């Protein structure tokens, strides 16, 4: 016997199995399309962010467009490993510079006038009650030495930090003590000697800083290229998956066409009558369905002559599904507007959304019949 709903497109005891199989395939397509949409959004967001960072356009981004060149771009994981290795090497070089700076510090601290600066100022013992009002950050050689030797990660990270604190030792003494005092003169003299020795080490420090800056810039570019390569690969994978979805839709369409029973004369009459009940917007959509399988049909003409009997079975079934859904949505919407509560309105919106997705699948199934896709290169 025929199944009354019309959506069930086989007869006999196998109807439920066939329908369940069809629904399962449609559900799989829904999930795949949703996942592909998320991936596309991620890629789009990546390139939008990249464009903002490169407002004038960068030639670097064009590198990954060449598939052969992309093979030479290290992966993100390798970039991270290389960054760790580079950071370790840079830290080792900086330790060597700090060791050389330690030699300068020992030479200054061994000077006969260095004794006032070896330990923290004894503020209470010397009665310097206003010391902390004048000096914001006390500093001395023993504190510097302890921080240079710290193993808990709190020590100096680069040689310029040590240099800054050595200067602070002498500048604090010159700031607090009168310029005619012995401590002020001693501090000023040792500061001048320190600056002379610092100038000898400075070229090496500058060279290391420049090298570090260049390495970081290169690493940033390499990471960007690696990310672009990953996004480009994802885009190709998405393209291949879209092709696979197209093939699934083609198979489903063939399944529908092969198993659908023919629309009866009475159903055609009811379909024609139902078309007249559609809203102007839905009528336009219905005419577009007809035009998809009939290129000569002018869906946008001022006067349209629609011969139901001349339409293919595929078009008739699509019209039947579309009209049924459109009238159901209209009826529920009217009921909600006429006195339904907010919950009914929410349910109507949900139905609208579900029916829209169903229509999109049906439309996609029909469209695949009109095109012969060529699988994109991988």
Image (cartoon, grey):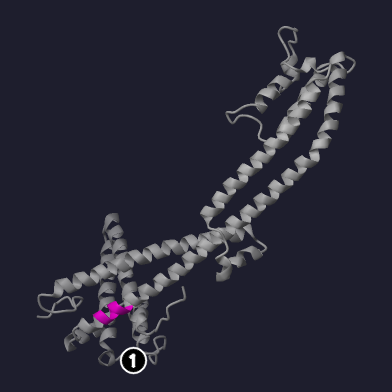
Q: Is residue 355 above or below residue 166?
A: below
Visible residue check, residue 342: yes
The magenta segment is 250-255
Q: Residue at x 27, y 70 (%)?
A: 25
* Residue 140 seen in render: no
Residue at figure coordinates x 76%, y 28% from the top left: 103
Residue 251 highlighted magenta (yes or no): yes
In the drawing, does residue 361 fall left or right of residue 144?
A: left
For mark 1, give the secondary structure.
loop
Q: Quadrant of residue 269?
A: bottom left
Secondary structure mainly formed by the magenta segment: helix
* Residue 176 on image: x %, y %: 80, 18
Residue 141: image location, x then y, percent: 73, 21
Of residue 292 and residue 206, the one placed in the foreground of this image is 206
Between residues 74 and 26, which one lies in front from this camera angle?
74
Residue 355: in magenta span: no
Residue at image x 51%, y 53%? 77
Question: Quadrant location of residue 206?
Answer: top right
> Residue 56 or 313: which is nearer the viewer?
56
Relative horizontal placement of residue 244, taking residue 344 as reference (left or right): right
* Tag 1 residue: 305
Q: Going 67% across and 63% down the picture, which residue do you hit?
A: 56
Residue 254 at what x, y percent from top left? 27, 82
> How far from the left and from the top, in percent, is residue 218?
65, 54
């Amino acid at each position: 016997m025929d199944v009354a709903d019309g959506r069930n497109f086989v007869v006999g005891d196998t109807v439920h199995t066939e329908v369940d199989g069809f629904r399962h395939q449609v559900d799989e397509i829904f999930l795949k399309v949703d996942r592909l949409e998320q991936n596309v959004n991620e890629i789009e967001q990546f390139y939008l962010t990249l464009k903002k960072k490169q407002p004038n356009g960068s030639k670097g981004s064009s590198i990954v467009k060449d598939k052969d060149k992309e093979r030479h771009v290290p992966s993100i994981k390798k970039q991270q490993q290389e960054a760790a290795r580079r950071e370790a090497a840079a830290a080792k070089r900086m330790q060597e510079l700090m060791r050389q700076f330690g030699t300068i510090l020992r030479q200054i601290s061994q000077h006969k006038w260095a004794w006032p600066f070896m330990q923290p100022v004894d503020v209470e013992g010397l009665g310097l009650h206003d010391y902390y009002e004048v000096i914001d950050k006390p500093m001395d050689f023993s504190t510097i030495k302890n921080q240079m030797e710290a193993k808990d990660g709190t020590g100096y990270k680069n040689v310029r930090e040590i240099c800054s604190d050595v200067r602070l030792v002498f500048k604090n003494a010159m700031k607090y003590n009168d310029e005619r005092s012995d401590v002020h003169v001693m501090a000023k003299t040792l500061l001048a000697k320190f600056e002379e020795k610092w100038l000898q080490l400075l070229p090496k420090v500058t060279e290391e800083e420049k090298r570090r800056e260049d390495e970081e810039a290169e690493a940033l570019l390499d990471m960007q290229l690696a990310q672009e390569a990953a996004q480009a690969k994802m885009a190709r994978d998405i393209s291949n998956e879209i092709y696979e979805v197209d093939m699934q839709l083609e198979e489903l369409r063939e399944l529908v066409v092969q198993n659908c029973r023919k629309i009866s004369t009475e159903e055609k009459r009811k379909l024609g009558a139902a078309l007249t009940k559609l809203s102007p917007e839905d009528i336009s959509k219905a005419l577009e369905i007809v035009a998809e399988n009939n290129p000569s049909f002018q869906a946008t003409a001022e006067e349209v002559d629609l011969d139901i009997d001349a339409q293919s079975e595929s078009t008739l079934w699509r019209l039947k599904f579309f009209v049924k859904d459109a009238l159901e949505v209209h009826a529920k919407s009217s009921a909600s507007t006429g006195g339904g509560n907010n919950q009914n309105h929410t349910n109507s919106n949900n139905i609208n959304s579900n029916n829209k997705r169903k229509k999109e699948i049906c439309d996609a199934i029909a469209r695949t019949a009109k095109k012969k896709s060529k699988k994109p290169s991988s």
